[in-house]
Amino acid sequence: MSKLRIATCSLAGCFGCHMSFLDLDEQLAGLAEQIELDRSPLTDIKHLAGDGIDIGLIEGGVCNAENVHTLREFRSRCRILVAVGACALTGGVPALRNGIPLAACLGEAYLHGPGIEAAGVPDDPELPLLLDRVYPLHEVVRIDHVLPGCPPPAAAFHALLTAIIAGQPPALEYALRRFD
Ligand code: SF4
């Protein structure tokens, strides 16, 4: 049986969901016999290999133009797309900025906040523009499955992946459906 190809990425996330995936510890060795990592912060692969990605795991919400581009690329190339963690599901803690005008956020970060020297909002064209607010993934693309939690427990990743490997619909038991 060929291995499932998995890609992962962090958009407006903190990498904590990836760390929780790594919390699978020795179970990763078992999974490694059945999955193969494509583009991911855990590999050095810079671009998705093609259209043949079986599962895309995305942590983080969508906060800037590059996030939108990356998310759409994952959606177009991954057969199954999974929103991983509270940020991907709802925007999470970064979405606390949604009630504040973007100009005020930038002003606090770069112009008026404590400890600022050489005030000025970065405007290099290489920098992705921030969106007006932080969006959950499902407001940008279709999502197939979700892993709730901040972060989801390692066992939730295992349950999801083993179900998909077995050709079963993922169904998280109650104890694995946490939101904190
Ligand atoms: S859900 Fe929590 S752990 Fe995951 S990226 Fe967001 S803040 Fe980090």
Image: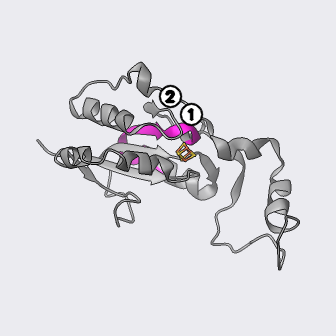
The residue to which callout 1 is attached is 180
Task: Please rate how many residues cluster around mark 1, counting C-alpha atoms within 10 Å: few if below 14, some from 14 to 19, many from 20.
Answer: few
Residue most toward the top?
174
* Beta carbon of the mark 2 residue lies under 8 A of ligand 1: no
Q: Tell me the residue at 45%/53% (across/down).
A: 9
Kind of residue indicated by mark 2: Arg
Residue 126 colored magenta?
no
Which residue is nearer to you in this view: 150 or 43? 150
Where residue 107 sits: x, y (%)?
A: 85, 62
Q: Give whichever of 146, 116 is nearer the camera.
A: 116
Q: Residue sitting at 36 percent across and 47 percent down? A: 23
> Residue at the spot x=23%, y=28% of the render?
167
Along the line of sight, the residue nearer the viewer: 122 or 85: 85
Start-end of magenta stretch: 73-87
Badge 1 amino acid: Asp
Q: Badge 2 is on which residue?
A: 178
- Residue 125 vs 3, above or below: the answer is below
Name the residue nearer the viewer: 71 or 179: 179
Quadrant where ligand 1 appears: top right
Residue 8 percent across, percent down from the top left: 40, 51
Does the residue at mark 2 contact the one at mark 1 (Cβ under 8 Å)?
yes
Asked if residue 136 lies left or right of residue 22, the reply is right
At 65% across and 68% down in the image, what residue appears? 127
| SS category of the residue bearing label 1 | loop
**Cα–Cα span, label 2 and label 1:** 6 Å
* Place of residue 54 in the rendered image (x, y in percent of width and height, measured from the top left): 30, 42
Up-down relation of residue 136 to residue 77 (above or below): above
- Image quarter hosting the N terminus: top left
On whether residue 74 falls in the magenta region, the answer is yes
View extreme (right): residue = 112
